[in-house]
Image: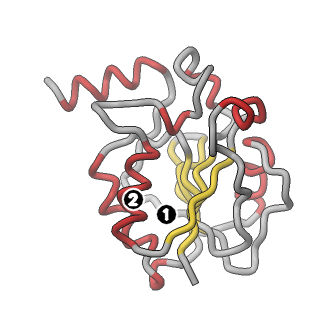
Amino acid sequence: MSAQICVFEDTHVGRMYPPSLTRPAFLITVAGYTLWDIVGMAARDAGDVEVSTVVRPYLVKTAPGVGETPPPAGGTLYLNGSLVPDAGLIPVLQPLLAPDGATPFLCTVGQRIAAGRVPSDAAPPGQETPESLTAFLLEQNLPLRDDLGLELLDHPFDTIRKLEEVFP
């Protein structure tokens, strides 16, 4: 069975306005990378990985290939589309995609879900939106992990802050 990743937008994506108006949060560029690029690199290194997305409904019509594949049932690794697209995220994701990394968990940053893996018998209800997917993940009562060191982009100026860290 292949590993499964679902990159999703949460209900806080509007804070990233204006960059998030015309594109999913995971397509916002920071220092030459998008989260989509980072997920693609981690997935390529992990082998057989299926990637799906959950975005705001109007973006399904405007961003080709985005939101067309619903999240698969069970065992999926969910990644918030607002994760900082840093190449340092690849070695964090790789063990989570390995067969022995399939332990269910939830990782939060502040009041937001940054990542989570649901049990293999947990399936989202279908017709996912940022609101319904966040609720689904919270309803799973997953054990919390705080050792992943994940960061989220909360506001447009966070992209500048990250650039200043990379290019002081």
User: Residue 145 got which mark?
Assistant: 1
Q: Circle 2 sits in a helix, a strand or a loop, which is it?
A: loop
Q: Callout 2 environment at 10 Å: few (<14), some (14 to 19), or many (20+)?
A: few
Q: Mark 1: which amino acid?
A: Arg
* Quadrant for the N terminus in the image: bottom right
Q: Which residue is mark 2?
A: 148
* Residue furthest front as drawn: 64
At 77% from the left and 57% from the top, the residue drawn is 136
Q: Circle 1 sits in a helix, a strand or a loop, which is it?
A: loop
Q: Position of residue 10 (x, y in %)?
A: 66, 40
Q: Callout 1 environment at 10 Å: few (<14), some (14 to 19), or many (20+)?
A: some
* Residue furthest left as drawn: 168
Residue toward you, 48 or 141: 48
Residue toward you, 61 or 94: 61
Residue 86, image quadrant:
top left
At 56% from the left and 14% from the top, the residue drawn is 18
Question: Does residue 83 lie above or below 2 as drawn?
Answer: above
Question: Does residue 14 lie above or below 135 as drawn?
Answer: above
